[in-house]
Structure formats: C-alpha cells, structure tokens
Image (spheres, helix red, strand yellow):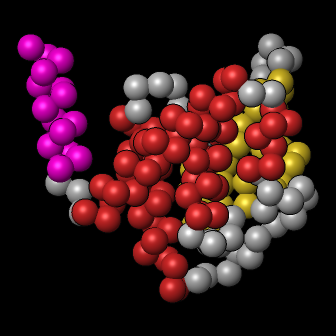
Amino acid sequence: MKVLKKLGSKINTLTALPFKTKLLFIEAFFTSGWVKFCLTIFPFNRVMHWLGTTNTESSTEVDVESLVLRRQIKTAIDLCRKYAPWRTECYTMSLTGRLMLKRRKLPSTLYVGFMKDEAGKYKGHAWLRANDIYISGFKESKGFTVNFRFS
C-alpha cells in the first residue's frame, strides 16, 4: 500500500508541473538513460567528444534572455535525478545537462574534480555551469579540486 501511495504522490508532482517543464523532464529522462547506457557499454574515449573543448571555460556573465530556459533545464535535471529508476551519478547528470544545453546552442562548462577521502582513496565529481547558474552537482562539489574544464 505504501508503494502505491508513494507512486501516486510522484505522479501528482509530475502532473502539476508546467507543460514546458514536463517536456524538458521527459527529454532529461531519456537523455539521461541514453548517457547512462553509453557510459556503461562504450569506452570513455568514444563519448569524450560530448564533453567539449578541454581546459576552456564559458562565460559566467548573466544572460537574461536564456535565464528562464536554463532554470527550467536545471529543474528537469533535478527531477530526473529524483525519479529515474537507474543510478544518476553526477557525471551522468552533468553530461545530460550539457547535451540539453548544447541542443539549444547555450554555452556551458562541465567541471571534473577530485579529492582524497579519509581512507586515502580518490573520489571524483562532476558538475555543470551555464553562465551564472549551476545546472547540476555544485552543492556536492565542496572540497573537490577542479582538474578539468570542458566547454
């Protein structure tokens, strides 16, 4: 019974979204699935071209014209992370956002950083910025040193 109630709550949340956000969520959902599939079966150098140009950064200036769209894409990415039935790691979500922004010819920068944990093991993290808005992964980026930038 709990499962049905939880599913009903999720469906209510999704149906209450504005139409454009629903469309972006559907795009994020399928793009995320495709990215996850590709990262699982293809070698990294095969999907590397999705990242963009190495060690370059896009503008951080405010772009009022695309602000609403960038916020909607951020919302769609957040919803996808919450509702996708597969694990949505930071790298998958950053690449998903990057591809969605690229389709709309909006510039972005994907950051990849690393840090050592208490056990001495390296941990990686990826996050995405489009102008003045972080689309995914920024909250979790604290403590990570940026090693690569792609735009």
**Which segment did they paint magenta?**
1-15
Q: Quadrant of residue 72?
A: bottom left
Q: Quadrant of the N terminus?
A: top left
Residue 133 percent across, percent down from the top left: 58, 66
Residue 74 percent across, percent down from the top left: 48, 57
Q: Residue at x 70, y 43 (%)?
A: 126
As for residue 123 lying within the magenta part, the answer is: no
Q: Is residue 136 above or below residue 20?
A: above
Residue 19 percent across, percent down from the top left: 25, 63
Q: Residue at x 38, y 51 (%)?
A: 25
Q: Main secondary structure of the magenta part?
A: helix
Q: Is residue 114 visible?
A: no
Q: Is residue 100 above or below residue 140?
A: below
Q: Quadrant of the C terminus?
A: bottom right
The foreground one among 37 and 80 is 37
Image side of residue 77 versus residue 117, left or right = left
Image side of residue 22 versus residue 107, left or right = left
Q: Is residue 60 above or below residue 114?
A: below
Q: Quadrant of residue 115?
A: top right
As for residue 2 lying within the magenta part, the answer is: yes
Q: Residue at x 64, y 63 (%)?
A: 102
Q: Is residue 97 visible?
A: yes
Q: Is residue 61 above or below residue 75?
A: below
Residue 51 percent across, percent down from the top left: 77, 51
Q: Residue at x 57, y 43 (%)?
A: 93
